[in-house]
């Protein structure tokens, strides 16, 4: 079964490079998720597995899916607390909060996904700049308005959600446990 899925992914990646539609991103993430489950290597590809689930579900709130994000969420919380709150229209300087930049640019996902592709000998053309940019933009459109909710937060963060932003930019909205004003980070892609 896994050989057939790998072959389908190989054919898909050779035919759809770069991806041009959201449905192609969804298909790719579904097939990757199947393989991660078949190989039972969720722990090695926890970031990729989270994004596969996030792609498929309108809300991510199950604790077992979020435990691997706790370190990153703690770093995002520290970045926000160190930098204060910003209003909707203010851009956060590029040197502010590398954790915010890492999360919103999908940098950790790219690394985890590339390692997964290497492990099963899939073509790596998806990770070339133009191809990755197209994939990332379509994935972010899929993930917009699909919050990650922390039911038992270990930080001040209650939820994180991508919001629609200008072309070439992403807005990350962070809601807090104390129901204070949400933090909005607008970053360029």
Image: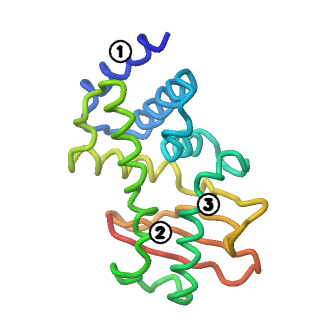
Residue under label 2, please give it.
171
Quadrant hosting residue 124: top left
Mark 3 Cα shell of 10 Å, populated few (<14), some (14-19), many (≥20): some
**The disc label shown at residue 7, or none:** 1
User: Which of the two marks, 2 or 1, is nearer to us in this view?
Assistant: 1
* Residue carrying label 3: 70
Q: Are marks 2 and 1 in contact (CB under 8 Å)?
A: no
Q: Nearer the viewer, residue 161 or 145?
A: 161
In space, the residues marked 1 and 3 are separated at their CA atoms by 34 Å
Instruction: Please give left or right for residue 5 compared with residue 147 in the image.
Output: left
Q: Is residue 117 above or below residue 154?
A: above
Task: Tell me the residue at 53%/61% (across/down).
Answer: 162
Q: Residue at x 55, y 21 (%)?
A: 38
Q: Nearer the viewer, mark 3 or mark 2?
A: 3
- Spatial CA span between label 2 and label 1: 36 Å
Report the side of 132 relative to 47 (left or right): left
Disc 3/disc 2 C-alpha distance (Å): 21 Å
Q: Position of residue 153 (x, y in %)?
A: 73, 65
Q: Which secondary structure, mark 1?
A: helix
């Amino acid at each position: 079964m896994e050989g057939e899925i790998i072959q389908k992914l190989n054919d898909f990646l050779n035919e759809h490079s770069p991806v041009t539609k959201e449905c192609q991103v969804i298909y790719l993430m579904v097939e990757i998720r199947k393989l991660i489950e078949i190989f039972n290597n969720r722990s090695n590809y926890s970031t990729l597995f989270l994004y596969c689930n996030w792609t498929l579900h309108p809300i991510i709130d199950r604790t077992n899916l979020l435990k691997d994000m706790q370190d990153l969420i703690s770093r995002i919380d520290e970045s926000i607390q160190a930098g204060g709150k910003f209003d909707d229209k203010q851009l956060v300087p590029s040197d502010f909060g590398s954790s915010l930049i890492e999360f919103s640019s999908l940098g950790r996902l790219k690394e985890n996904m590339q390692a997964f592709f290497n492990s099963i000998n899939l073509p790596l053309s998806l990770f070339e700049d133009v191809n990755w940019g197209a994939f990332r933009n379509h994935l972010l459109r899929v993930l917009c308005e699909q919050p990650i909710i922390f039911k038992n937060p270990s930080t001040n963060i209650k939820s994180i959600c991508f919001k629609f932003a200008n072309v070439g930019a992403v807005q990350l909205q962070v809601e807090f446990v104390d129901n204070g004003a949400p933090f909005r980070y607008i970053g360029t892609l």
